[in-house]
Image (cartoon, rainbow, N blue to C red):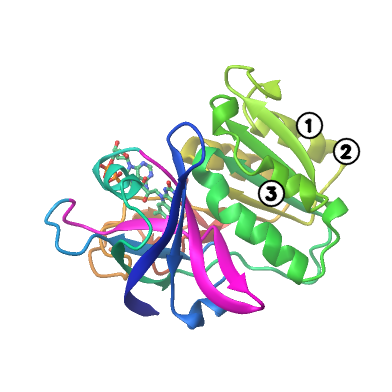
Amino acid sequence: MYQEKVKVLWNNPAGNEYYRIGLTCHKGYSGAKPGQFIMLHFPGRMAPFLPRPFSIHRIITTQGRTEGIELLYKVVGEGTKLLSGHRKGDVVNTLGPLGNGFIFSNHYKRIFIVAGGIGVAPMLFLAVYLQTKGTDPSECTVFLGGRSKDDLLCSDDFLRMGMKIHLTTDDGSAGDRCFVTHPLETTIENYRPDIIYACGPLEMLKCVAGISEKHTVPCQVSIETIMACGMGACLGCAVERKEASGNYMHACIDGPVFDASALHL
Ligand SMILES: Cc1cc2nc3c(=O)[nH]c(=O)nc-3n(C[C@H](O)[C@H](O)[C@H](O)COP(=O)(O)OP(=O)(O)OC[C@H]3O[C@@H](n4cnc5c(N)ncnc54)[C@H](O)[C@@H]3O)c2cc1C
Ligand code: FES
């Protein structure tokens, strides 16, 4: 884990309220796993007081050397608004890589990736990682959902990798007009995957976990709780265990990726 002052390499609008920001980083990030995150803070500023968690979206490499990380973020409040105003050369504080990340097994041949809205941020890194593990992209299916077409990010990246993709929007402006869990449910009935990886809003994750349980397919979910420290100190990111009511794990150190069957979602 590295605590660093890092430079902004770029901070480009990606449509709607979304941005991609490139940051320099320690070369140790070459070992980061998809699903891991960083805590980002603004040096010399009182507000926002607490750092903010962001998933690693991409490792930036030049000729095989790790040069930085890219984050994909949505402006939702004070911290992300402030971040969106940063320019090349500005400095931010980072702590990471944090958390556990998605677990891959060589037994996973047929893979479903489910992403809702900004939940796609760690999933592109996951897709790239799966390729490095030798998975056949034609056996990977991505279910990408958003409120409207502007909330469907990275679909071209998944397609370029040769993965199949199902797009859904709440308003029907792109793909099918339904929740992303609808094509997941219909596809799974005829085409059972070895693993489901999911990240997105809690309601979506609840539904994905229910589908995985019904079809007895293993499922890993990345949980986006409110986080204040990212290191197990504040206990603000508690998530309840399924089999032990009142017994909690913490998303920052035990997660943010969990086996869906272990959580009371
Ligand atoms: C492990 C992890 C990884 C994350 N990865 C990303 C990412 O890659 N890209 C990205 O855009 N966001 C990501 N988030 C969410 C991101 O941390 C929040 O959007 C951010 O902290 C909001 O800060 P703010 O100061 O702009 O908003 P605030 O002013 O703090 O809050 C504005 C609104 O957003 C809500 N909010 C705050 N945090 C969250 C959250 N975690 N989930 C849902 N709603 C929240 C608040 O309740 C409030 O309604 C991640 C969160 C976690 C825990
Ligand atoms: S964010 Fe502080 S304990 Fe998890």
Task: Please name the amino acid that badge 2 sits on.
Answer: Asn
Q: Tell me: is circle 1 under 8 Å from ligand 1.
A: no
Residue 143 placement, left or right of 5: right
Q: Seen in the image, is 3 located left or right of residue 18?
A: left
Where is mark 2, residue-wise? Answer: 190
Pointer 2 and pointer 1: residues touching (CB < 8 Å)? yes
Give the mark, 2 or 3, whose residue is nearer the N terminus: 3
Between 261 and 251, the one lying in front of the other is 251
Q: Nearer the viewer, mark 2 or mark 3?
A: 3
**Range of the magenta residues?**
48-75
Amino acid type shown at disc 1: Thr
Tally of numbered discs:
3
Q: CA distance from mark 2 to mark 1?
A: 7 Å
Q: Distance of mark 3 from mark 1, alpha carbons?
A: 15 Å
Find residue 147 and report its horizontal and vertical position in percent.
53, 26
Give the secondary structure at mark 2: helix
Residue appearing at x 69%, y 58% in the figure: 127
Among numbered discs 3 and 1, the one appearing first in the sequence = 3
> Which amino acid, mark 3?
Ile
Does the stretch in magenta take in 255?
Answer: no
* Spot occupied by residue 186 in the image (x, y as percentages of width and height): 78, 31
**Which residue carries the number 1 mark?**
186
